[in-house]
Image (spheres, coloured by chain):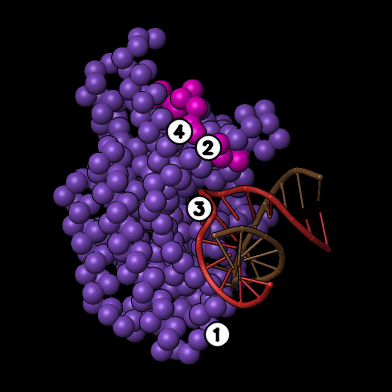
Chain colours: A purple, B brown, C red
Amino acid sequence: MSPSKVNKLRLGLCCMFAREPIKFRTTTATAMLRLGKRERLARVAELCLVNADALLAALGYCAAHGIGAFRVNSQILPIKTHPTAGYAVAELPGSSAIVARYRECGAFAREHGLRLSFHPDQFVVLNSPNPRTLKHSLAELDYQAEVAEWIGADTINIHGGGAYGDKPSALRALRANIERLPEQVRSRLTLENDDKVYTPEDLLPVCNGTGVPLVYDAHHHRCCPDGSTLEASTEAVRATWGRREPLFHISSPLEGWDGPKPQRHHDYIDAKDFPKAWIGWLLTVEVEAKAKELAVAKLQADLADSKTHAR
DNA sequence: AGCGGTCAAGTTGAT
DNA sequence: ATCAACTTGACCGCT
């Protein structure tokens, strides 16, 4: 295979660094609510600005080390949607400088061809029957879409949510709620197969029906299989992206595939776990491994190695 | 500086 | 019933 084919594939780093001294800060709602509103907003504004600087540093690291994508931490604006300690960006002292700093991150990413994504955490459940959970989920998506617009992130990736004992019904609820999303969220939204409820085959009809692409996680598919092979799912999933560059996830099991909890992530990626069917395509693969940038570097080297040493 | 308790939130499955 | 797992331990107040 030619080097140019391999080089179409870019690896992504998720949220944080293991060794490199680049840190994102956060706080707790409890601590902030001990303060008066004025002081609270000042403290939060400081963290938002510090995190913008950290993001710029993170992007600089990626650009310098051939890492083509970076996933942004959900707490980059700390406690943004908390019911009582949350805030609007415009309330923060120096808000225009904060936004300007994030837009600088966006400009840097664009100049260096870096792809940015968000992955709202487990509390964002678009098919929850609990109206408060749904409302909060929508608020969280709005917030992440706001920052995504500043920095030019093209994906906000979530899981299918709960099954609530009736998958077809839960999937209908998911689809209905996707269709009601505001454009700035929906245009970036993606769904990902998870490790215990929703497989690619479960989600593909929702994706094909709504135009929301599917983020294919090979590790989750191995933990929670359906009737489809990795190769067939790769093809079906790729089609949900249309002309956009697909985004996939890779990780390796902490204690092997036969260990007690194969869904737990290892520090590094075992090159044998990296699907050969993914090599040679224009594709982003986010590396979910605890050793973070060290794991990306190792996988870069292993993939380059498998290219030069004929199998 | 180091340490232990705490932290906003949902859902599932293992124990 | 409790708890760990999930993209990830980090923060805070105390000593």
At mark 1, the secondary structure is: loop
Give the residue pinned by disc 2.
A267
Q: Position of residue A84 (x, y in %)?
A: 52, 83
Sequence-first disc among 3 and 1: 1
Q: Which residue is mark 1?
A: A34
| Segment tinted magenta in the rendering | A263-278
Q: Say if labels 2 and 1 share a chain.
A: yes
Task: Tell me the amino acid under the disc marked 3.
Answer: His
| Circle 3: element type | strand
Which residue in the protein does label 3 denote?
A159
Write the residue at 44% across / 36% down. Answer: A295
Mark 2 element type = loop
User: Could you tell me the amino acid type at mark 2?
Assistant: Asp
Disc 3 to disc 4: CB gap under 8 Å: no
Q: Residue at x 41, y 76 (%)?
A: A44
Closer to the chain start, of discs 2 and 1, is 1
A295 and A86: which is toward the camera: A295
Q: CA distance from mark 2 to mark 3?
A: 23 Å
Q: Chain of mark 1?
A: A
The chain under label 3 reads: A
Of the residues shown, which amino acid type is indicated by label 4?
Answer: Ser
Q: Do marks 3 and 4 share a chain?
A: yes
Separation of marks 2 and 1 at Cα, in angstroms: 38 Å
Question: Dot 4: within a 10 Å radius of its alpha carbon, few (fewer than 14), some, or many (20 or more) residues?
Answer: many
Q: Are marks 2 and 1 in contact (CB under 8 Å)?
A: no
Question: How many angstroms separate mark 4 from mark 1 (CA)?
Answer: 50 Å
Tell me which label, 3 or 4, sits earlier in the chain. 3
Residue to which mark 4 is pinned: A233
Q: Mark 3 vs mark 4: give the one in front.
A: 3
